[in-house]
Image (cartoon, grey):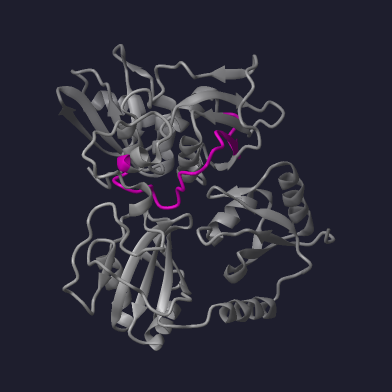
Amino acid sequence: MAEPSKVIHIRNVGQEISENDLLQLVQPFGVVTKLVMLRAKNQALLQMHDLSSSINVLQYYTNVQPSVRGRNVYIQFSSHQELTTADQNSQGRKGDQDSQPNQILLVTIHHMLYPITVEVLHQVFSPYGFVEKIVTFQKSAGFQSLIQYQSRQSAMQARSSLQGRNIYDGCCQLDIQFSNLSELQVNYNNERSRDFTNPSLPTEQRGRSSQHGYGDTGSLYALQSSGARVAFPQMGNAAAIAAAFGGGLPPGVTGTNDRCTILVTNLNPDKIDEDKLFNLFSVYGNIVRIKLLRNKPDHALVQMADGFQAELAVHFLKGALLFGNRLELNFSKYPNITPAPDTREYAGSSLNRFNNNAAKNYKYCCSPTKMIHLSSLPQDITEDEILTHLEEHGTIMNTKLFEVNGKRQALVMFENEEQATEALVCKHASTIDRSTIRISFSQLQSI
């Protein structure tokens, strides 16, 4: 083992992992002064402010398996004692040599909060030269695209100008590499692929892969076109679950995780309890049991009904703010939580949201937003009563009452996501005029 160093070496850093993800992994232990991503090797070097901070990182992750976006990463001391500018430049040149420039770019989009289409990609990349072909697909790294230019010079200019930039403000970050392919084969012009040199190509039949071998979700998750009615079970059945998400899983969600128990850290121990954790995690699946770790007051274990629901929770809640703390989530090394007097049971709770109509609930899974949706409200409730019930949790910017199938519902927009998250964890399943209200996050941007 290398001697202690301020510089930490992280391995198995997948393309879906961003610099910000790694910062969240170690920032609870101290200030990070430098970070170098070695994309060609799936590795990273990260320098802490002082030696004691890096030692604390290694000591903690000796007992807890670090995981980022569902991928286990491996941490050790680096042989470097300091990261210098020369080190960073030389690493950058080495990475460039591993992927020689050509006319095809491999683009991975991180933090994809808005849909990205062929048209959007063409608009972003066409200012740098004539784009001949675009293919989009879903892999474990997230939403990806192959973009073929007419010339290698155009591809180099696009990569230089767009690497690390966001398509939309604050999200949809571009991670661009040169592909090792020499030519893209496009068989169909549709929402997933386009050959701009051959507009007469046919559109693709649903469920077939437009770019064989590139990992399009169409072939992996699309339902069979037999006309049979598909039931949506509470657990399992990747095809049915994918259909609930509109035909493909959310970017960054693999659907292959089989670990049901989540380790939640960096909680605010003065304000959190089991019921509040239940209210938050039940947005993503049914809860079996929850255990607060008494010897580590800012730690908790949450066991969900299956691995897919646990993956959704980790994916959407990692880094979320709650009671002033930024949550860190990893899959636990324990397969389940052993029932005990200090463990809260929820398996039979009627408040589990996925007991009925699981497909509908999967559809609304998302990261915390500043807009919450209230249902099961009293028929005669007023906006003032809703404000009174929720205003202790933050500044309410707007509200809207409405009815769906004769049932009273409401949208409430807070000033930021943290306030909305606090309102959800504190007031989901609370009572207004003998009615038990339900609260979830809304994906609407405004009322």
Circle count: 0
On the image, the x and y values in percent for residue 441 come to 35, 37
Quadrant where the N terminus sits is: bottom right
Q: Which residues are magenta?
A: 243-270
Answer with left or right where residue 8 lies relative to residue 141. right
Residue 123 found in image quarter:
bottom left
Q: Residue at x 45, y 41 (%)?
A: 312
Answer with left or right where residue 304 lies relative to residue 93. left
Q: Is residue 266 above or below residue 433?
A: below
Quadrant where the C terminus sits is: top left
Q: Is residue 135 above or below residue 267?
A: below
Q: Is residue 113 visible?
A: no
Q: Nearer the viewer, residue 205 or 408?
A: 205
Q: Residue at x 31, y 68 (%)?
A: 121
Answer with left or right where residue 187 lies relative to residue 254. left
Q: Is residue 347 visible?
A: yes
Asked if residue 252 lies in the magenta stretch, the reply is yes
Residue 285 found in image quarter:
top left
Q: Nearer the viewer, residue 286 or 230?
A: 230
Q: Is residue 434 above or below residue 447?
A: above
Asked if residue 246 lies in the magenta stretch, the reply is yes
Q: Residue at x 61, y 28 (%)?
A: 336
On the image, the x and y values in percent for residue 235 come to 42, 31
On the image, the x and y values in percent for residue 210 come to 30, 62
On the image, the x and y values in percent for residue 167 come to 35, 65
